[in-house]
């Protein structure tokens, strides 16, 4: 705001309510080449300064409040219903609603088409829309690499890594295979007759399947499905011989005695020692490396926003998700699903995603999955 004084020229005043470190105090002005003078004793500027002060004081406090949603927030899941991403999105939405952590509602929307491309492109095209968030899995990298979909994670804004997800080698409990070694020996002898069920084509489940083949010389026939929930059902029904589902995708069938866990694709055992079945906890499942299968793979469970959003809008969701992670329901969910509880945000999260992209380029290239 410029105040014109006939004697001293233009007076520039900083409104007191906006003052921060380095601001010019009320009553001090900058003239010409930067000379600083007190001007509140001048009739014209004094009156104007007092008027400006009064106007600033009259601004309601809510005008300076941090950003928050003003309408329904869409929570996009780039995968089918029942899978790990879908379950995590719905538990987050449920915790927010139960604990009234948001004034506006949140709705989960599955957009699984094109190996998740439908969901990613929707969010990419919603630049600047802070009322839309997306949960990601490895298809954040694999889908554009395998299909040339015009999308890259840099089109989005990283918000929060919620956890990392494990993968387990599962077989039907009625089969005779009690160990990884026994099962893979049978697969190797089967000459491609054994079916591995997984979520999507040229995504994380098939990447792991190819890695197993390269390590052992075994050969699978890979069958793709829309989501991990469907994959688990197919294994229970013996339509496939094995899967590498995430723990949360198969825990109900494991608890019911329908599935058998052979090994986990992580460097160390899962830390959860509460019994899930009558005889086993997640901790009781050996690592695949300990069984002679040297394959490791963890998957991102992270939240992103569209590009072009503000720092305040990102911080709103960082704080919201921090509150979600502090609830007993979230703790129980992580234990039930045997998640790796690594969390990141800000620059650390962004750097981690960049490293994972580079790793997936290498993995996809080795598997022959890169689009031509």
Image (cartoon, helix red, strand yellow):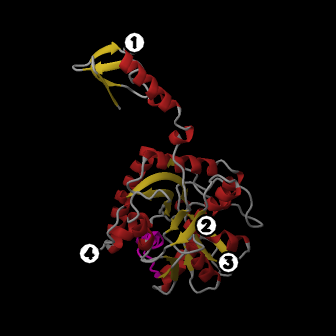
Gap in angstroms between the C-alphas marked 1 and 3 = 89 Å
Quarter of the picture containing the C terminus is: bottom left
Could you tell which of marks 1 and 2 lies nearer the N-terminus?
1
Residue 84 appears left or right of 308: right
In the image, residue 264 lies at what x, y percent?
Answer: 57, 63
Spatial distance from mark 3 to mark 4, Cα to Cα?
Answer: 40 Å
- Mark in front: 1 vs 2: 1
- Reading the image, the residue beneath label 3 is 173
Which residues are drawn in magenta?
202-222
Query: Disc 1 designates what residue?
Result: 41
Measuring from the top left, give residue 118's x and y in whole percent.
43, 73
- Which quarter of the picture shows residue 279? bottom right
The residue depicted at 60 percent of the width and 83 percent of the height is 234
CB under 8 Å between discs 4 and 1: no
Q: Given contact means CB atoms under 8 Å apart, are the residues at marks 3 and 2 in contact? A: no
Which corner quadrant of the image does residue 364 belong to?
Answer: bottom left
Distance (Cα) linking label 1 and label 2: 67 Å
Answer with mark 4 or mark 1, whichever residue precedes in sequence: 1
Residue 205: say if magenta. yes
Contact (Cβ within 8 Å) of mark 2 with mark 4: no
The vertical placement of 207 against 51, above or below, is below
Q: Earlier in the sequence, mark 3 or mark 2?
A: 2
Reading the image, the residue beneath label 4 is 372
- Which residue position holds label 2? 87
């Amino acid at each position: 705001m410029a105040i014109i004084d006939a004697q001293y020229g233009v007076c520039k005043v900083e409104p007191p309510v906006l003052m921060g470190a380095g601001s010019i105090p009320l009553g001090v002005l900058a003239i010409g080449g930067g000379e600083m003078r007190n001007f509140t004793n001048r009739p014209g500027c004094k009156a104007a300064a007092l008027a400006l002060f009064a106007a600033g004081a009259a601004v309601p406090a809510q005008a300076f409040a941090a950003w928050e949603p003003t309408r329904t927030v869409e929570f996009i899941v780039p995968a089918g219903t029942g899978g790990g991403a879908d379950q995590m999105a719905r538990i987050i939405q449920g915790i927010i609603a139960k604990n009234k952590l948001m004034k506006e509602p949140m709705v989960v929307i599955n957009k699984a088409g094109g190996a998740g491309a439908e969901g990613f492109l929707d969010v990419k095209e919603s630049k600047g829309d802070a009322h839309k968030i997306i949960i990601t899995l490895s298809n954040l990298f694999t889908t554009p690499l395998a299909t040339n979909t015009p999308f890259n994670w840099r089109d989005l804004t990283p918000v929060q890594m919620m956890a990392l997800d494990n993968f387990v080698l599962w077989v039907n409990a009625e089969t005779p295979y009690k160990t990884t070694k026994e099962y893979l020996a049978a697969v190797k002898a089967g000459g491609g007759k054994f079916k591995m069920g997984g979520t999507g084509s040229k995504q994380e489940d098939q990447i792991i399947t190819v890695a197993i083949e390269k390590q052992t010389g075994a050969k699978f026939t890979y069958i793709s499905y829309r989501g991990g929930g469907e994959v688990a059902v197919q294994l229970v029904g013996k339509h496939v011989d094995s899967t590498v589902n995430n723990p949360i995708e198969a825990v109900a069938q494991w608890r019911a005695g329908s599935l058998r866990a052979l090994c986990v694709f992580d460097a160390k055992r899962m830390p959860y020692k509460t019994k899930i079945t009558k005889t086993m906890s997640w901790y009781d499942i050996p690592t695949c490396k300990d069984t002679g299968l040297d394959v490791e793979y963890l998957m991102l469970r992270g939240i992103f926003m569209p590009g072009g959003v503000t720092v305040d809008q990102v911080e709103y969701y960082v704080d919201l998700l921090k509150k979600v992670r502090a609830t007993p329901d979230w703790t129980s969910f992580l234990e039930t699903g045997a998640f790796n509880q690594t969390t990141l945000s800000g620059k650390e999260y962004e750097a981690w995603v960049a490293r994972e992209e580079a790793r997936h380029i290498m993995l996809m290239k080795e598997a022959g999955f890169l689009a031509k």
